[in-house]
Structures are given as structure tokens and as C-alpha cells.
Image: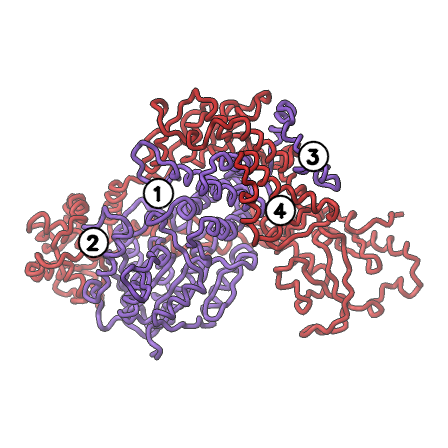
Chain colours: A purple, B red
């Protein structure tokens, strides 16, 4: 079949429609030697074809393309095949919503939910530096910012269940002038996205407190809860959240250094501008406004560096496909194809892909924006960008040295970006709420 | 005497196709002779040489400076050099006659690609390339770290296991931050702190009881989990001595009971009673005196502080209670027993991506359009066992992408009665998708299993090999390069005929039709990659 591609390609092109009538028995045998990994760009086009077909309700075309994609996809194949398998799943999931069934349809995810133990999660966040990078940069910046403070209060908005804090506690414990009293407040509401734990936030807090005690760091842990909302949708919970972010509700104390930590979080706050707002204020902007009003000593924002919230499905598919190959590729370099850790990690990314591609409206909770856009938003909200110091950079460098050699780091203005083979993956930023630094 | 072979063919080790550079057909070894000033380099007149990945991955370390042919042994190189009929003085291999060479890395994204960062010796660039961009063939047995260069691997093996961090639970870490994070959450730490001398926190309890009453009906604050170490050493549990270092929040952890904690407190309660005997001070016993609801919260707080203060089994027992409250289900539910892959099974297995279904091997006689019931097992829907077993690429595919797309078109034409909508199923009584996953919401679709056209319509479930033979087929087409015109490729506007074949042929045109244009121009060997393709074809 290689001869098809070589110089005689013209002879088998579409201009020769007789090929369409090739008798089936000659094709059948070919079926077995089925298509391996198509080129990435080709797969991307196929995905776009499929999406477009779904949007135009052209089901025949959609199924044809899905058939082709299915021959490429494999969750235990190479990077492209794996990515394709998750994208195909997401498209099928979307197709099912195009034609809702007679049964009661709750719009849940098709992908199995997986709960981890805390120790499993601890290993999970260290599989690749994806999360650890953010932890390292943020903790280093926080440590620097609270130098000389005897009391620190961290408002933790993240989805990694406090995996970030042991290393900070450890660093604070070793402070030459002794550790500060540390308080960490988390919210009880959290988007139902991986990684998921099999224990409560309180339990996590217990363990963290135990660890802090072990290191002789005075410690408190609070879960900011509003039980009335436990059954509401995430959007409603978040709206209510904003009313809870007051000095009294959070019990902020005058002598504390307040730290705001946003890790992979802002993306879940809706960016839809309220209809009645003349200034285009969205929930996300409102959140930042409130945060700024609390006058934190430092605000650190870490998230993935990609714009995955475009209204156009095709645009999302393209961007998503051209971004999420990064973690897949990173996992591919050092984990074998059948590694269960790798499969689970990829499955969690698949969860994200499904939400981005298959859902719309309020159900599409993944509304990631890139570091550049986020920085602009922060500046619009009145924050001032802080540069990371040399110590932080050196810490990150030594972290990355311990991982595979494809990981790197670069600076984009005041932003520090984790790179894989030169491509932006995770960005980290630090902000002050006032211009004058003490 | 050794034939004058091209260096690239002599480099048998060069077959390890470099993953990151994506050069499936690396260009033949090229020597770039540039005369340019190299800032920072000690020798600005050095000759910059860019070798191909194949050359760099070769295992021949001794290289003839005249023709760059590589040898594994110096003696062989010397033998070879004689064949060049060198003038007598050059036979001495004097380096001052030869201009200094520096080497750049062929990987465009690499920092050493820039001539100003070239490496000074051939061995260095080879090692660099192998390490950074090569396939990691050497694996440490202890820690599974992989290396591309054998000497690196050996060096690591000597020190591996010597500087590692070990948690009490037995897990070992080579990195400190992983160790610390794990240790913070590990059960072993909880048990270890059980052995620490108890530290009293009880005046706080008293305060809670006394001060909390006025607050008890006020705004419900969630209980805080607190730890305050004693500022003064207090080896004996003496509540009187325990300094009031309690942060205000602890005292203000109002006993009013939000509903969400009631569940917890009721379960915590029994723990508390078991903890009490451990606590020497009488004050703790007074804690459960008040109303159960009130107590619940107090206990929650106190058990956390109490547990923190006397470490002990309170943590582990509360852990276990919590753990049992939230039944951990870390394992995904296993797949149904293998069945012929009807569409229903397809959907079912969609929710269990990680469990392969050992589906019956294919019968080759089945026509493509009736694939679902016959086949080899779906690729993404419950990966077939055979895929998992084999990682070596299977024999080259006999079908190209174009042919595959053509087939899909045929399938579309043949099964024009079926539709995806029906394929996904709207109404049928039988074989509902198992409702065991509450998240498989949409999976309530039902299908008439007898409806072959539906099964055919979806046409899914064909096997997927992992051969990469197609890569080579797709390489030469510049169609895949540019990204911007993706929507143009749809050609759906063009194929306004509305027939399925019409649309699909537009699809084929966009993807495969480029063959027409490029066939004449592109030679099979030359690859025209964008960096995007490079990285993704890995």
C-alpha cells in the first residue's frame, strides 16, 4: 500500500471513484491490518470533522469519522492513540447528549470516578512535576512573603486536597527564627473533578495537623462550610461562596499575614458576565475583587497555561488536543504502556477532556484561561505583579533536575512557566494587592 | 579492507529512532561548515558541525577526522586511517593541523542547537543527545529511573538506594519533597505520634463549655481542627499549667451544630468515649455532659485537639471511622464478563476504560459493515487483551489511511438506513445499560440488539493495532502541516450534495487528497515537518 503514497499517488486519488466500489472481500482481509497511529495533525482534523458533523446533525458522517478514529484510538497505545481514545470518548459522550434519551438523563460523566487514599494522592501529585511545580513555586513565594511574620493564615483554593502544604510546613518549621503559627482554611465546596479522595477534608486536616505537631508548628485547620448548599450545583455554591468571603466569616485576624493560594481553581469560576452589569463583571472577577479587598499579603495563582474556554467547539478541540498531548507525552517518556498509574492519570485528564468537549453551558465547568490572560485579569482587578526571587528559581531548577530531562522552566515577564520540551504547560504567578511592599 | 560506507549506515545503533525529534527519516549526515564568530566560545574559528541524530546515537566512539566514519575501537580506526593514504606527517594524528570542531545538537528545541552553545567534543554532543533526546534504554532496577547513556545508568546504580528517604510505612523516596508530602499524610505518622507524651489542651475545653453557651445559638461556625504546642514544657499532664495559648478560633469553635457535622459527630462520639480513659485529666470527662448535639461538635473539636495532644489511637480510630464513612473505592469496577461486542456492551465498556475485555478474536470473513458483532474487540472500548499483550509493532498494515477512509465511506453508503441517533438508541426494552454506575447517566440508552443495521451503523469496535507503519505513509504530505485552514478541510460546504458519500469524499479529499498535489513534488524520503508534527509523531 505504500505505493499509493509514492509518486503514483495520483492514480488512486479521489478522481478514481471506482475505488469506492472495490468488492468487500478484498477489503476484509485488509481490515485486520488495521490502521496504526495516524499523524497527530490528521487525528486533529478527524476530530474536528466529527465535531462539525455532530453540530450539523450529520450523523452518518459523524459515525464514519468515529469509525476511523476508533481504529486509531487505544488507551494503551502510543501518545497519539491514547489522546485520541479520550477525545473520541468525549465526542461520543457529546453525541449522546445531542439526542437525549427517553430515560432520565442527569448529564453525568461517562468516565468512572476513582477515589484515592491520601497516600495514593501524595504519590499521584508527584508522578510528573505538573502539580509539584506549582506547589514549589507557590510555597517558595509564600515563604518569602511571610518572612518575619509570626502568624500566617492561608486561604487555600485548590483541587489537590492540601497536598501542597506539607513541604511548606516543613520549610516553616526550619525557619531560623522559629515557625509562625499557621492557619489553613479550605472551602467545603469543590468541583467534582479528579483527583478525588476517599476521605473528607476534615480528615485531611487531621493528618496535616498531626504532621504540623510532629514538626512543632502551631497549626489550625478550618473548613469553610455552608451545609445548606451541599446539594446545589457548583455554580450556586460558588455564588454563595462569595458571600462567605468576608473578614468576619473567615475570621480574619489583624495580626495575621493573609495568604491567598489559587491552584487550578479560578478556571471553575464562571466567566459569564452578569447581564445587568455594565462593566462586564463575572463571578470570576467578583471573586478576585473580594480577595483583593481582604488585603492579602500575597496572592499566588497557578494554573495550566492554555485557553480552553472558547465558545466554539472546534476551537476547543484544537486547543485541547494541542495542549494535552504534553502530559501524555511526559508520562510516555518514563512509564510503560500498561502502567496503571499512567492509565489513571490519563483517565483523569480524559475526564477534563470530556467536560471541555462534551458539555456546554453550566455543566462545562472547565473554563481554563492562559497565564497571559489571567495576568491581564489580575491587573484589571487591581493586583500588582510580583517577581519571583532567585531562590525560588533555584528551588524549581533543582526540582526539575530530579525529573526527566524534558522539563524546563522559563520566565515570561513576571510569570514562571513550566515547560515540557519547550512547550508551556503550567504557569505560576504572584500578586500583591497594594503597590507598596512592606 | 573496510569499504567506504557512509557513516550513517555504519551506525547500526542509529536505528533507535529518536522520539523527540520526530525525524523518522533523518536527513543524511550533514556537515555544516560555517565560519562564524561564536560568542563565548574560546575558539571563534572553530568549525560548527551539525550531525544527524542517527550519527549521534551511534555507538562508535572513535571517529576518523577525515571522513567521520565511526569505529568502536581505536585500533580499527587506525587501520582505517591508513586507507586514506595520508601524507606521512598527518598519520601522526597531530591535532594542531586539524581545525577545532564544535558540535551542535540537531534537536531544534534544545538549548544546544544554538551554535553559541555548541559542545566542544564529539563524545560530549553524542552523550548529550543520547541523554536528552534519545530513547532511554537503561533502567535502574531499584528505582525504575531510566537512562539513555549506559555510563549514566551505571553511575546511578552505584548511588541508588544510598540517599533515599524511607517512611515508617516502608515506602522509599528518592526525592525529599515527595517524602515529606507522603509522610505528612501517612498512617505511620499517626501511629508514631501516639507514642509522644500527652500534652494537655483541656483548659480550652473548659473555656469552650463556659464561654460557648452564649454563642451556642449564634452563627454556626464549623469546628476547627487545631493544634497548639505548649510553650512551656509540660511533661506531666497538668491542666492548670497548660498555658492559654489556644488561638481564639478554638474557643470560638462554637458548639452550634451545622447539619453537616452532625453525621460526623455522631460517629465520632463513640470514639470519644474510648479516648476518655486515656486522658488523665478529669476535665475531658466532663465534655460529653451537655446535649448530644452540642457535645458532638465539642467532641469533634476536642477529639481533634485531644487526639492531637495525646496523639494516640484517637487519630487512627477516627481515621478509620472517617474512612468507613467514606467507603473508599479506589478500584474501578471490573468489566462485565466478555460478551460479543454488541453496541450495549460498547457503551458499557465506555465507562470502564481501564479494564480490558478479552473479546473473541476476529473472524476475518466478516464484512466490514457488520463489524460489531464479529470482531476483534474494540480498541477504545475495553481494550482487547491482545493489544495489551503485545507491544512490539504487529506486521505492517496492509491498509493506508486513505483506504480506511474509503472503506468508511463505503460503510456509510451501505448502512445508510442506520443512524447514529438510532445507534445510540432511543427506545428499546431490552438490554439496558447496567445502572451500577451512577455516573453513567447517558448510558440509559437502549438498543435493539437484533438490529444489525444499528450495529453496523456505528461500525465501531474494530481493532486497533499499534503499528506505526502509517506514519511513514503520512509523512510526505504537506497537508498536515498548516493548521489554520482546518475548517476549510471540512469541505462540507463544497459537497453540498448532501449524500453521505459526498460528505465523506470531501473528507477524504481534505485528508488524503493532498496526495495528488504532493505526489509529484514530495519524495518519499524527504520529510517536511512542522515542529508540531515532530513532537506529535513521537
Looking at this view, is A154 or B158 the one in front? A154
Structural crowding at the residue carrying mark 3, measured as other residues with C-alpha within 10 Å and reported as few (<14), some (14–19) or many (≥20)? some
Structural crowding at the residue carrying mark 2, measured as other residues with C-alpha within 10 Å and reported as few (<14), some (14–19) or many (≥20)? many
Label disc, if present, on residue A226 of the rendered structure: 2
Looking at this view, is B276 or A266 the one in front? A266
Label 1 and label 3 in one chain: yes
Find disc 3 in the rendering and name its residue: A1
Image x and y of residue A40, in percent: 57, 46
Image x and y of residue B477, in percent: 67, 47
Q: Identify the element where label 3 is drawn.
A: loop
Q: Identify the element where label 2 is drawn.
A: loop
* Mark 1 to mark 3 CA distance (whole Å): 47 Å
Dot 1 or dot 3: first in sequence order is 3
Q: Looking at the rendering, which quadrant does residue B129 occupy?
A: bottom right
Frontmost of labels 2 and 3 is 3
* Mark 2 to mark 1 CA distance (whole Å): 23 Å
Label 2 and label 1 in one chain: yes
Frontmost of labels 2 and 1 is 2
Specify the quadrant that holds the N terminus of chain A: top right
Dot 2 or dot 3: first in sequence order is 3
Find disc 4 in the rendering and name its residue: B137
- Up the image or down, B95 lies above or below B192; here it is below
Report the side of B249 relative to B131 (left or right): left
Label disc, if present, on residue A115 of the rendered structure: 1
Label 1 and label 4 in one chain: no
Q: Looking at the rendering, which quadrant does residue A30 occupy?
A: top right
Label 3 and label 4 in one chain: no
Looking at this view, is B315 or B337 the one in front? B337
Amino acid at each position: 500500500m505504500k505505493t499509493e503514497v509514492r509518486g503514483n499517488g495520483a492514480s488512486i486519488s479521489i478522481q478514481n471513484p471506482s475505488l469506492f466500489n472495490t468488492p468487500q472481500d478484498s477489503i476484509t482481509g485488509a481490515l485486520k491490518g488495521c490502521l496504526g497511529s495516524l499523524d497527530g495533525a490528521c487525528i486533529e482534523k478527524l476530530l474536528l470533522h466529527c465535531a462539525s458533523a455532530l453540530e450539523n446533525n450529520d450523523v452518518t458522517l459523524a459515525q464514519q469519522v468515529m469509525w476511523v478514529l476508533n481504529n486509531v484510538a487505544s488507551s494503551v497505545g502510543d501518545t497519539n492513540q491514547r489522546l485520541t481514545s479520550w477525545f473520541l470518548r468525549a465526542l461520543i459522550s457529546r453525541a449522546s447528549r445531542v439526542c437525549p434519551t427517553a430515560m432520565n438523563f442527569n448529564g453525568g460523566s461517562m468516565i468512572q470516578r476513582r477515589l484515592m487514599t491520601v497516600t495514593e494522592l501524595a504519590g499521584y501529585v508527584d508522578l510528573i512535576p505538573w502539580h509539584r511545580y506549582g506547589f514549589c513555586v507557590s510555597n517558595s513565594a509564600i515563604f518569602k512573603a511571610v518572612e518575619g511574620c509570626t502568624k500566617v493564615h492561608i486561604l487555600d483554593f485548590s483541587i489537590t486536597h492540601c497536598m501542597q502544604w506539607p513541604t511548606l510546613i516543613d520549610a516553616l518549621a526550619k525557619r531560623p527564627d522559629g515557625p509562625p503559627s499557621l492557619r489553613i482554611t479550605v472551602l467545603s465546596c469543590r468541583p467534582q473533578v479528579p483527583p478525588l479522595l476517599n476521605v473528607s477534608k476534615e480528615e485531611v486536616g487531621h493528618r496535616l495537623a498531626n504532621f504540623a505537631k510532629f514538626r512543632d508548628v502551631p497549626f489550625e485547620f478550618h473548613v469553610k462550610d455552608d451545609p445548606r448548599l451541599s446539594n446545589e450545583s457548583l455554580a450556586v455554591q460558588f455564588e454563595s461562596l462569595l458571600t462567605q468571603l468576608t473578614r468576619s466569616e473567615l475570621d480574619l485576624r489583624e495580626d495575621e499575614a493573609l495568604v491567598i493560594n489559587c491552584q487550578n481553581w479560578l478556571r471553575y469560576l464562571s466567566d459569564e458576565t452578569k447581564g445587568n452589569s455594565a462593566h462586564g463583571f463575572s463571578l470570576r472577577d467578583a471573586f478576585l475583587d473580594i480577595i483583593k479587598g481582604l488585603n492579602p499579603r500575597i496572592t499566588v495563582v497557578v494554573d495550566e497555561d492554555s485557553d480552553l474556554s472558547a465558545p466554539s467547539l472546534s476551537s476547543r478541540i484544537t486547543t485541547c488536543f494541542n495542549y494535552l498531548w504534553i502530559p501524555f507525552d511526559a508520562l510516555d517518556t518514563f512509564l510503560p504502556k500498561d502502567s496503571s498509574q499512567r492509565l489513571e492519570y490519563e483517565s483523569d485528564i480524559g475526564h477534563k477532556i470530556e467536560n471541555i468537549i462534551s458539555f456546554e453551558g453550566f455543566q462545562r465547568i472547565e473554563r481554563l484561561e492562559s497565564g497571559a490572560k489571567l495576568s491581564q485579569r489580575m491587573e484589571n482587578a487591581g493586583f500588582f505583579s510580583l517577581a519571583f526571587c532567585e531562590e525560588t528559581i533555584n528551588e524549581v531548577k533543582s526540582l526539575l533536575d530530579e525529573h526527566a530531562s524534558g522539563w524546563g522552566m522559563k520566565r515570561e515577564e513576571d510569570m514562571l512557566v513550566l515547560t515540557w520540551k519547550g512547550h508551556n504547560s503550567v504557569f505560576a504567578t504572584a500578586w500583591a494587592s497594594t503597590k507598596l511592599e512592606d | 579492507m573496510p569499504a567506504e560506507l557512509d557513516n550513517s549506515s555504519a551506525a547500526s545503533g542509529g536505528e533507535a529512532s529518536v522520539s523527540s525529534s520526530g525525524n523518522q527519516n533523518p536527513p543524511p549526515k550533514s556537515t555544516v561548515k560555517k565560519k562564524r564568530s561564536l560568542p563565548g566560545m574560546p575558539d571563534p574559528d572553530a568549525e560548527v558541525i551539525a550531525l544527524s541524530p542517527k550519527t549521534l546515537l551511534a555507538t562508535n566512539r572513535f571517529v576518523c577526522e577525515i571522513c567521520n566514519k565511526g569505529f568502536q575501537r581505536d585500533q580499527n580506526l587506525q587501520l582505517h586511517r591508513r586507507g586514506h593514504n595520508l601524507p606521512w606527517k598527518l598519520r601522526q594524528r597531530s591535532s594542531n593541523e586539524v581545525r577545532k570542531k564544535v558540535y551542535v545538537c540537531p534537536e531544534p528545541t534544545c538549548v544546544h542547537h544554538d551554535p553559541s552553545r555548541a559542545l566542544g567534543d564529539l563524545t560530549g554532543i553524542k552523550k548529550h543527545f543520547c541523554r536528552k533526546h534519545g530513547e532511554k534504554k537503561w533502567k535502574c532496577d531499584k528505582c525504575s529511573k531510566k537512562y539513555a547513556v549506559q555510563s549514566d545508568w551505571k553511575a546511578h546504580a552505584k548511588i541508588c538506594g544510598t540517599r533515599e528517604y524511607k517512611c515508617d510505612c516502608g515506602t522509599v523516596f528518592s526525592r525529599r519533597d515527595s517524602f515529606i508530602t507522603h509522610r505528612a499524610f501517612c498512617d505511620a505518622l499517626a501511629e508514631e505520634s501516639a507514642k509522644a507524651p500527652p500534652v494537655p489542651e483541656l483548659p480550652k475545653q473548659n473555656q469552650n463549655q463556659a464561654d460557648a453557651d452564649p454563642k451556642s445559638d449564634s452563627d454556626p461556625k464549623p469546628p476547627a481542627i487545631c493544634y497548639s504546642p505548649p510553650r512551656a514544657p509540660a511533661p506531666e499532664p497538668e491542666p492548670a499549667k497548660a498555658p492559654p495559648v489556644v488561638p481564639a478560633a478554638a474557643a470560638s469553635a462554637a458548639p452550634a451544630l451545622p447539619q453537616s457535622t452532625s453525621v460526623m459527630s455522631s460517629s465520632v462520639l463513640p470514639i470519644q468515649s474510648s479516648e476518655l480513659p486515656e486522658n488523665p485529666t478529669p476535665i475531658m470527662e466532663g465534655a460529653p455532659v451537655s446535649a448530644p448535639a452540642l457535645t458532638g461538635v465539642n467532641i469533634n473539636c476536642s477529639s481533634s485537639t485531644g487526639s492531637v495532644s495525646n496523639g494516640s489511637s484517637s487519630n487512627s480510630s477516627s481515621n478509620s471511622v472517617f474512612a468507613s464513612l467514606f467507603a473508599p473505592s479506589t478500584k474501578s469496577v471490573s468489566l462485565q464478563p466478555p460478551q460479543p461486542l454488541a453496541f450495549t456492551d460498547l457503551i458499557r465498556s465506555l465507562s470502564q476504560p481501564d479494564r480490558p475485555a478479552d473479546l473473541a478474536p476476529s473472524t476475518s470473513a466478516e464484512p466490514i459493515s457488520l463489524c460489531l458483532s464479529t470482531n476483534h474487540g474494540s480498541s477504545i472500548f475495553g481494550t482487547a487483551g491482545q493489544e495489551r499483550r503485545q507491544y512490539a509493532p504487529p506486521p505492517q498494515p496492509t491498509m493506508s489511511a486513505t483506504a480506511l477512509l474509503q472503506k468508511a465511506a463505503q460503510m456509510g453508503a451501505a448502512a445508510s438506513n442506520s443512524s447514529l441517533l438510532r445507534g445510540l438508541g432511543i427506545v428499546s426494552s431490552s438490554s439496558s445499560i447496567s445502572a451500577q454506575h451512577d455516573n453513567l447517566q447517558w448510558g440509559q440508552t437502549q438498543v435493539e440488539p437484533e438490529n444489525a443495521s444499528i450495529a453496523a451503523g456505528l461500525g465501531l469496535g474494530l481493532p486497533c493495532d499499534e503499528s506505526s507503519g502509517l506514519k511513514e505513509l503520512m509523512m510526505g504530505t504537506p497537508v498536515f502541516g498548516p493548521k489554520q485552514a482546518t475548517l476549510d478541510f471540512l469541505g462540507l460546504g463544497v459537497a453540498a450534495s448532501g449524500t453521505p458519500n459526498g460528505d465523506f469524499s470531501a473528507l477524504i479529499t481534505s485528508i488524503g487528497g493532498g496526495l495528488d498535489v504532493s505526489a509529484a513534488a514530495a519524495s518519499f524520503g524527504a520529510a517536511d515537518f512542522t515542529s508540531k508534527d515532530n513532537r506529535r509523531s513521537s
